[in-house]
């Protein structure tokens, strides 16, 4: 409860974006394109990072938000910890399709604000792209595609499919958002945490380098997709 209270009291940690560049009319903090595009050896969940001794791994946040609430509330506590790895993927704050649009926008902001903060602290950061309702990846409601603000085109991004493509409806919305992302960002490298079915990804495989990583449960059992 203390971490949740701190996030609210601090107004999304406004001090984190001091010196950041902003994108769009919503002024979403920018995660700048790195000078070198790095593909990690593996993506390790935040809560499992102390079980891995691999400096070429990256920390990911494909977990329930409460499990990385400390990072959202007090990111300065983890600067030295994250420097043990080749980089991090910006926090995967939940964007539920049925959540109010204001909440979805806030969680895009948090993703970029934390990522921008760590980048300005010298940590290599790959932006995690997450979309929610159609309002976040189209211009049907807002004049800009919120899900892609603060991310540079022709660069490296990360997405997660773990738990996101289970139903027919999930697959439809994931594919729609993926298509919008490919058009908006034209990424060079896409890191994919979780399954990567050809029925969803097949048409994009020649447009970018897709690199798949097994989710942690599958990784522990030596599984491959």
Image (spheres, rainbow, N blue to C red):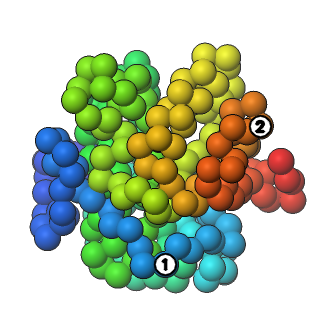
Mark 1, residues whose alpha carbon is within 10 Å: few (<14), some, or many (≥20)?
few
Q: Is residue 136 above or below residue 150?
A: above
Q: In which quarter of the image is the N terminus?
A: top left
> Is 77 placed left or right of 24 in the picture?
right
Residue 29, given in percent of the width and then of the height, sits at: 23, 56
| Residue depicted at 58% across the width and 60% down the height | 189
The reply to whether dot 1 and dot 2 touch (C-beta < 8 Å) is no
Mark 2, residues whose alpha carbon is within 10 Å: few (<14), some, or many (≥20)?
few
Q: Which residue lies furthest to the front in this view?
A: 206
Q: Residue 60 carries which label?
A: none
Mark 1: which secondary structure?
A: loop
Mark 2: which secondary structure?
A: helix
Residue 110, given in percent of the width and then of the height, sits at: 29, 49
| Residue depicted at 14% across the width and 41% down the height | 25
Give the mark, 1 or 2, whose residue is nearer the N terminus.
Answer: 1
The number of discs equals 2
| Residue depicted at 67% across the width and 19% down the height | 167
Q: How far apart are marks 1 and 2 (CA)?
A: 28 Å
Residue 170, given in percent of the width and then of the height, sits at: 60, 23
| Residue depicted at 85% across the width and 53% down the height | 224
> Is 14 placed left or right of 77 in the picture?
left
Which picture quadrant has residue 71? bottom left
Q: Is residue 167 above or below residue 74?
A: above
Q: Can residue 88 be seen in this view?
A: yes
Q: Can residue 75 be seen in this view?
A: no
Residue 43, given in percent of the width and then of the height, sits at: 63, 63
Q: Mark 2 points at which residue?
A: 198
Which picture quadrant has residue 78? bottom left
Residue 177 versus residue 70: which sits nearer the camera?
A: 177
Q: Mark 1 points at which residue?
A: 36
């Amino acid at each position: 409860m203390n971490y949740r209270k701190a996030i609210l009291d601090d107004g999304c940690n406004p001090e984190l974006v001091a010196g950041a560049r902003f994108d769009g009319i919503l002024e979403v903090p920018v995660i700048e394109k790195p000078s070198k595009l790095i593909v990690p050896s593996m993506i390790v969940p935040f809560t499992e990072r102390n079980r891995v001794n691999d400096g070429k791994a990256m920390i990911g946040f494909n977990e329930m938000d409460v499990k990385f609430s400390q990072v959202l509330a007090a990111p300065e506590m983890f600067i030295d910890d994250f420097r043990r790895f080749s980089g991090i993927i910006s926090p995967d704050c939940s964007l539920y399709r049925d959540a109010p649009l204001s909440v979805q926008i806030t969680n895009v902001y948090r993703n970029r604000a934390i990522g921008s903060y760590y980048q300005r602290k010298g940590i290599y950061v790959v932006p995690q792209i997450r979309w929610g309702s159609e309002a976040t990846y189209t211009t049907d409601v807002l004049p800009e595609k919120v899900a892609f603000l603060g991310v540079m085109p022709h660069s490296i991004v990360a997405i997660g499919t773990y738990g996101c493509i289970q139903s027919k409806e999930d697959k439809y919305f994931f594919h729609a958002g993926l298509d919008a992302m490919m058009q908006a960002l034209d990424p060079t490298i896409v890191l994919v945490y979780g399954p990567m079915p050809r029925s969803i990804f097949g048409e994009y495989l020649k447009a970018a380098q897709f690199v798949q990583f097994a989710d942690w449960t599958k990784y522990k059992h030596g599984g491959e997709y």
